[in-house]
């Protein structure tokens, strides 16, 4: 074993230690998030109900003339910035207040726990990113050649995107608990089932398209995941709002949890924006893959299992976007499609890599 | 978050569609003078101008309730066509297409792995034939799969053509007149000023033109529209899908792909007979093979020498000289994995490599019966390239002059090793300690039977092994330069040296450029369609009873998005620079808006963006 190889080995070991420490810190963040939810306020309960209930008339009527007049008076000259009155689209449920402050429900103590959780997440992310980087250095290439490496990069992207959204002051604190939990699961799987010693790329994988195609695939996957979380929560929150609207009484636990989430409309919008923004990139990912396949295997499309499932995922997301413009498919049905589309993505990753015989099966397991 | 626009659940999609019909009726009824608002509820004029304001913001097909067809043949056809080109059926076909792709990824496909299909048929004598009947081994060329995507593309064409016409019409039309009551639009703002109405409108026109809106004048108002690129992008995207499909089909039907193994120093000419194996699309004519040839001059490979990744390939390179036409000038080139050579419309790929021991076989008379390199094939999945092969000697006579044939079967190891479990095998893919390990047979190779035979396997029927004195089968390992003597003066085999070989795939796939072009246009169109907003802005200015000018601005997006009101705010800010707002009228202050606070908790879109981690200062307080 030469010196460089020994060096690489110690880097690979360092990477592993970093990833394991990141997991430890994520676990602390998880505990802090739980504390945030447990000690956070439940008194915001019935805010939604309050918003829906007093309007005994159907929420589907247009705003009355009086409301409209009131809105019209809003032009003010005192403010520097002109005031723009916005109205929700005609029809549909009236706009509902979003739960504030993620899991804390606006409670000061809960909020402190929430902030601690975010601080810990930032720290864990730093360790996590350092782990991925050292892994990359240890193999002197992009860290994307087997499932262990995919998995640690994938969850790094997810957390990174979440932190960027937080830094941009978007209302995404509600994502925290779910993300930290799944990131822990992902890293746990990576470190047990999927762990592979660092190794080199076969020449077929050694191409600039590896950088473009695989990095985009991981990025799209991470963002699609955020979209999917939004969609699932949308479905829960939407049933909750439906129930309230029909005068039903949701359970205490459901109320406590769902009341702190943004309104169904906001969640839906969040998911749609992410999915729609990622879709062109996913399209490009597939095209980049085809270009690479043309160079490496002499055909740009060969219906290989991985290609098939990328295509299925693509068609499913296209279906989702279509559904939103199709009468009778908006809302919940479209959301179901988005979830199916993400499950296709997941299957392409775990299913095809582990169980299906494919040219692309570089799982390393 | 991105600039992505929303086609939110409650978008104007339906309103738009419904309103399309209304456009014609209400084209010029927006004359309801400014300020002359009726005291009663919304009258038909307002409804009509509002409908007109929302019309033609997209070209999505009008949704119809699925009613039964009229009973004439034409009625049926019309009904069927309407259904096929509706969004609902397009969606169902999309979902069907993804569903239909699934089996092909789980069941082996003839096209990709014929061997695994044969294996499957053998292991599942009941299920196999049923699958075969259902074309489950050829999913992507099956009747049912083709039916789905052809229907989808008929639907696509049937959808895209009218949408394109409609879009051209929209490009010609002026932005619709300002609805009589602007405050009913999704985003609205107003102020009073000392500036003259005409002056305000002039400023608005200039401002909007400067921001690349299309602007039209109304009576006392200005209408503007922007974001046509969104619709154009969407149309381009769908058109590009058609281009891609056609390119894909052409690529399949007129493609050809063949393989050839070339030993170093050997050559290849691109004609049908020279290929080891070749397959082509249904409409390909082998006379269209590009005329060229090449010689493999040198083959390089290197492997990791040490460390945990010992033996992992580092790189492969085939240096060749090639010529075009029958006798074009010779050119040098190298082909690497991922870096094919393009000659004419053909591409030459480097696929595999291996070793070819060079042997000399002498017959019973001491004459050379065979001399040359014999390619040995690497065993499946052995990274160290333990290879198998056969030396076939067809032209041989024994010591007594009797004509016979010889076969030497065995393995070649670039770096020889041996253990009890695996026997002789290779321990490293590079040539560190090459050896062959052979056993010898005599008899009839069966080559003359006319049946196709693998050059890498020995047909044992008709052959019998040479035996040693103890009655064992004659086996021997040889290093380069060593000779294996056959018993009873039957001749000898000398292992002289080792040569490299490489396999090449030569393929011609027309219309790849079209597929790539289509794909790039599709992405561009998609991005335009998803990231841009189509929206309308109206500005109205009129004098009120006090002789002051009231300015009203409103905007409407094709779908609900926080960007539209934001943009209206910026536009209003600019406009107010030239028409300074007066303090609000006292009565306006009384009517403190309930819904008026743009950042208030009842504005979903604003809220989504503005409630940060510390936003516990708005909304109702905890008790
Ligand atoms: C190969 C099949 C198809 C694919 C992959 C596909 C994909 C897409 C995608 C991804 C969008 C979203 C872009 C956006 O929201 O602006 C879209 C929009 C749209 N598609 Fe398709 N489409 C297909 C076939 C069709 C067909 C057959 C029709 C006609 C019935 C159609 C009509 C539309 C329309 C009208 C929109 C715009 C919706 C809107 O304005 O919000 N598409 N399509």
Image (cartoon, helix red, strand yellow):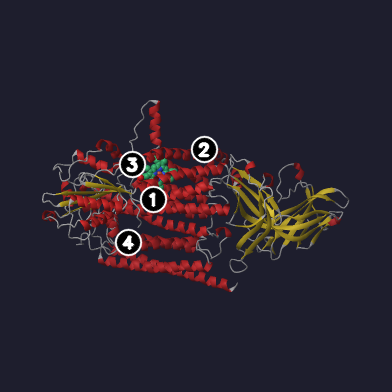
Q: Are marks 3 and 2 on the same chain?
A: yes
Q: Are marks 4 and 3 on the same chain?
A: no
Q: Earlier in the sequence, mark 3 or mark 1?
A: 3
Residue at mark 3: B172
Q: Find the distance from the CA under tag 2 to the CA under tag 1.
A: 35 Å
Q: Find the distance from the CA under tag 4 to the CA under tag 3.
A: 47 Å
| Figure check: B69 above or below A236 | above
Q: Earlier in the sequence, mark 3 or mark 2?
A: 2
- Residue B561 seen in the current view: no
Q: Find the distance from the CA under tag 4 to the CA under tag 2.
A: 50 Å
Q: Residue B345: x and y, percent?
A: 59, 48
Q: Secondary structure at mark 4?
A: helix
* Chain identifier of the residue bearing label 4 in the image: A
The numbered disc on residue A173 is: 4
Residue drawn 47% across the image and 59% down it: A215
Residue at mark 2: B143
Q: Residue A109: x and y, percent?
A: 27, 67
Q: Nearer the viewer, residue B48 or A54?
A: B48
* Chain identifier of the residue bearing label 2 in the image: B
Q: Nearer the viewer, residue B339 or A265?
A: B339
- Left or right, B491 with reference to A241: right
Mark 3 Cβ and ligand 1 under 8 Å apart: no
The numbered disc on residue B528 is: 1
Tell me whether circle 4 and circle 3 mark residues in contact (CB < 8 Å). Answer: no
The numbered disc on residue B109 is: none
- Residue B23 seen in the current view: yes
Q: Number of marks in the image?
A: 4
Q: Find the distance from the CA under tag 3 to the CA under tag 2.
A: 44 Å
Q: Nearer the viewer, mark 4 or mark 3?
A: 3
Tell me whether circle 4 and circle 2 mark residues in contact (CB < 8 Å). Answer: no
């Amino acid at each position: 074993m030469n010196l460089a190889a020994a060096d690489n080995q110690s880097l690979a070991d360092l990477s592993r230690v970093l990833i394991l420490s990141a997991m430890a810190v994520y676990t602390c963040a998880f505990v802090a998030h739980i504390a945030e939810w447990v000690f956070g306020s439940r008194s915001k309960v019935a805010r939604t109900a309050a918003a829906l209930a007093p309007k005994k008339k159907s929420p589907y009527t247009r705003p009355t003339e009086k409301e409209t007049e009131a809105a019209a008076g809003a032009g003010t000259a005192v403010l520097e910035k002109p005031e723009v009155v916005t109205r929700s689209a005609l029809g549909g449920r009236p706009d509902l207040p979003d739960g504030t402050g993620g899991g804390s429900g606006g409670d000061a103590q809960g909020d402190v726990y929430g902030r601690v959780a975010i601080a810990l997440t930032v720290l864990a992310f730093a360790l996590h990113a350092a782990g991925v980087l050292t892994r990359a250095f240890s193999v002197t290439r992009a860290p994307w050649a087997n499932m262990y490496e995919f998995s640690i990069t994938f969850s790094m992207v997810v957390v990174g995107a979440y932190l960027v959204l937080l830094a941009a002051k978007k209302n995404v604190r509600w994502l925290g608990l779910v993300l930290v939990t799944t990131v822990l699961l992902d890293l746990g799987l990576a470190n047990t089932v999927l762990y592979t010693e660092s190794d080199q790329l076969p020449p077929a994988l050694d191409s600039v398209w590896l950088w473009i195609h695989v990095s985009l695939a991981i990025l799209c996957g991470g963002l699609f995941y955020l979209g999917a979380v939004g969609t699932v929560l949308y479905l829960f929150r939407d049933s909750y709002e439906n129930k309230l609207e029909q005068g039903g009484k949701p359970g205490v636990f459901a109320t406590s949890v769902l009341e702190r989430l943004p309104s169904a409309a906001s969640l839906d919008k969040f998911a749609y924006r992410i999915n729609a923004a990622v879709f062109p990139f996913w399209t490009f990912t597939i095209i980049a893959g085809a270009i690479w396949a043309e160079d490496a295997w002499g055909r740009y499309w060969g219906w290989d299992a991985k290609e098939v499932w990328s295509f299925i995922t693509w068609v499913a997301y296209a279906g989702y976007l279509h559904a939103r413009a199709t009468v009778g498919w908006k809302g919940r049905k479209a959301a179901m499609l988005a979830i199916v589309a993400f499950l296709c993505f997941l299957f392409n990753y775990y299913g095809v890599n582990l169980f299906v015989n494919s040219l692309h099966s570089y799982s390393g397991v | 978050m991105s600039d992505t626009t929303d086609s939110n659940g409650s978008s104007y999609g339906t309103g738009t569609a419904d309103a399309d019909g209304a456009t014609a009726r209400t084209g010029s009824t927006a004359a309801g003078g400014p300020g002359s608002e009726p005291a009663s509820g919304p009258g038909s004029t307002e409804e009509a101008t509002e409908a007109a304001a929302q019309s033609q913001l997209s070209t999505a097909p009008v949704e119809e309730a699925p009613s039964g067809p009229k009973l004439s043949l034409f009625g049926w056809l019309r009904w069927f066509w309407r259904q096929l080109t509706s969004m609902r059926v397009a969606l169902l076909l999309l979902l069907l297409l993804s569903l239909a792709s699934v089996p092909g990824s789980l069941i082996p496909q003839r096209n990709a792995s014929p061997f695994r299909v044969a294996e499957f048929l053998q292991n599942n004598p009941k299920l196999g034939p049923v699958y075969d009947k259902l074309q489950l081994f050829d999913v992507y060329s099956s009747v049912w799969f083709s039916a789905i995507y052809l229907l989808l593309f008929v639907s696509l064409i049937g959808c895209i053509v009218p949408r394109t016409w409609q879009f051209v019409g929209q490009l010609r039309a002026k932005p619709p007149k300002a609805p009589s009551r602007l405050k009913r639009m999704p985003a609205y703002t107003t102020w009073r000023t000392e500036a003259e109405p005409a002056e305000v409108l002039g400023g608005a026109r200039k401002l909007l033109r400067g921001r690349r809106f299309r602007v039209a004048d109304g009576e006392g108002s200005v209408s503007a529209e922007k974001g046509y690129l969104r619709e154009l992008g969407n149309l381009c995207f769908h058109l590009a899908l058609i281009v891609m499909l056609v390119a894909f089909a052409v690529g399949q039907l007129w493609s050809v792909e063949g393989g050839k193994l070339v030993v170093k120093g050997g050559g290849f000419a691109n004609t049908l007979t020279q290929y080891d194996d070749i397959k082509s699309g249904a409409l390909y004519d082998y006379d269209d093979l590009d005329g060229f040839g090449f010689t493999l001059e040198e083959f390089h490979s290197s492997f990791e020498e040490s460390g945990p990744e010992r033996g992992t390939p580092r790189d492969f390179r085939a240096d060749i000289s090639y010529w075009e036409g029958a006798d074009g000038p010779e050119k040098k080139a190298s082909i690497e994995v991922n870096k094919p050579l393009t000659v004419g419309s053909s591409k030459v790929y480097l696929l595999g490599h291996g070793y070819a021991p060079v042997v000399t076989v002498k017959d019973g008379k001491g004459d050379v019966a065979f001399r040359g390199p014999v390619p040995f094939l690497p065993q499946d999945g052995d990274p160290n390239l333990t290879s198998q092969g056969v030396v076939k000697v067809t032209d041989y006579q024994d010591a007594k002059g009797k004509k016979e044939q010889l076969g030497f079967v065995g393995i070649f190891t670039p770096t020889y090793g041996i253990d009890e479990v695996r026997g002789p095998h290779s321990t490293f893919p590079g040539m560190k300690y090459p050896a062959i390990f052979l056993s010898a047979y005599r008899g009839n190779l069966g080559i003359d039977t006319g049946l196709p035979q693998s050059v890498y396997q020995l047909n044992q029927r008709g052959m019998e092994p040479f035996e040693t004195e103890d009655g064992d089968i004659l086996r021997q390992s040889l290093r380069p330069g060593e000779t294996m003597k056959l018993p009873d003066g039957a001749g000898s085999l000398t292992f002289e040296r080792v040569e490299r070989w490489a396999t090449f795939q030569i393929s011609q796939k027309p219309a790849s450029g079209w597929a790539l072009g289509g794909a790039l246009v599709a992405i561009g169109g998609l991005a335009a369609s998803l990231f841009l907003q189509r929206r309308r802005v109206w500005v109205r200015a009129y004098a009120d009873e006090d002789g002051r000018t009231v300015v009203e601005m409103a905007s409407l997006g094709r779908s609900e998005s926080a960007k539209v009101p934001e943009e209206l705010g910026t536009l209003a800010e600019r406009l107010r620079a030239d028409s300074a707002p007066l303090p609000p009228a006292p009565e306006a202050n009384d009517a403190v808006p309930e819904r008026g606070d743009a950042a208030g908790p009842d504005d979903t879109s604003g809220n989504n963006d503005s409630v940060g981690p510390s936003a516990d200062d708005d909304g109702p307080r905890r008790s």
